Amino acid sequence: MRQTIIAGNWKMNRDLNESVALASEIVKGINVLKNRIVVLCPPFTSLAAVSQILKGKSGVFSGAQNAYFEESGAFTGEISTKMIKSVGADFVILGHSERRKYFDESDDFINKKVKKVISAGLRAILCVGETLEERENHREEMVVKRQIQGGLAGISQDEMKSVVVAYEPVWAIGTGKTATPEITQKMHEFIRRRILEIFGAETAESTSVLYGGSIKPGNVKGLMECPDIDGGLVGGASLKSEDFLKIIYFDR
Ligand code: PGA
């Protein structure tokens, strides 16, 4: 059985006090979590405080939105995996399309971070997904294949246990345009086949592949019912506790 993961990517939103309030509201609304886990990814400045709030809450974890691959040193502005671990976080989002686009992150650079995150004992959420232009030119599978192969290069079968993949078509992020369950399922199946080719059937069967892009309480159920969609990476709707809780409990 694959793990269902509902992760909230707060992006560059919520200062410390606002983060504490939001995390507290979400935690208050979570009771029993059957067959699923929840991950809250606040900005770095709130990660320690949010992790503290989640302490002892079964099935709810915190995550960072990025990490650097060096252990320590003169890398002004960067955050190491050791620092992330030290505040109690368990996950790290890597290769988000906004980082690829605004900060020129390449597959090779992302791959170094994936390796570092895994070796530090954290779990990586590797984001992949095509732009609108790439889809219009029917290059979406080629692009996602490249991102999967590049991002996961040199990773062992055993290390894959610490990897979650998130398919986030760029044209659906923050746009209100959700990929339909059909489009999404097709790509998730494609991604699982690529994982099978690289790592074998067992890894392909056990790796959680999340969908991300304008997930809302109103569209989450249809997406989560698809056989190869194992959860969601939620941006905008994760900033409203009421919406995020509805997404967590999409099958109620
Ligand atoms: P969105 O963002 O839900 O606001 O579209 C998703 C993401 O970028 O992770």
Image (cartoon, helix red, strand yellow):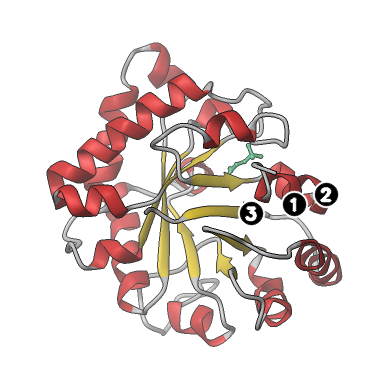
Residue denoted by label 2: 242
Question: Which of the 4 quarters of the picture holds residue 56?
Answer: bottom right
Q: How many marks?
A: 3
Whether tag 3 and tag 2 are in contact, CB under 8 A, the answer is no
Q: Which mark is residue 8?
A: 3
Tell me what residue is drawn at x 68 percent, y 45 percent: 247
**Separation of residues labelled 3 and 1 (CA atoms):** 11 Å
Residue type of the residue flagged with mark 1:
Leu
User: Is residue 144 found left or right of 68 in the rendered image?
Assistant: left
> Circle 1 sits in a helix, a strand or a loop, which is it?
helix
Q: Which mark sits nearer the N-terminus, 3 or 1?
A: 3
Q: Nearer the viewer, mark 3 or mark 2?
A: 2
Q: Which mark is residue 71?
A: none
Q: Is residue 76 above or below residue 7?
A: below
Whether label 1 lies within 8 Å of ligand 1 gets the answer no
Q: Looking at the picture, tell me which residue is in the foreground, 49 or 67.
A: 49
Where residue 249 appears, as percent x and y from the top left, is 68, 48
> How packed is label 3: few (under 14 Cα within 10 Å), some, or many (20 or more)?
many
Q: Looking at the picture, tell me which residue is in the foreground, 228 or 156.
A: 228
Where residue 91 appears, as percent x and y from the top left, is 49, 67
Looking at the image, in which quadrant does ligand 1 appear? top right
Residue denoted by label 1: 245
Residue type of the residue flagged with mark 3:
Gly
Question: Which of the 4 quarters of the picture holds residue 188?
Answer: top left
Q: Is residue 77 above or below residue 135?
A: below
Where residue 205 appears, as percent x and y from the top left, is 27, 48
Residue type of the residue flagged with mark 2:
Glu
Tell me what residue is drawn at x 29 percent, y 26 percent: 141
Whether tag 2 and tag 1 are in contact, CB under 8 A, the answer is yes
Tell me what residue is drawn at x 15 percent, y 52 percent: 199
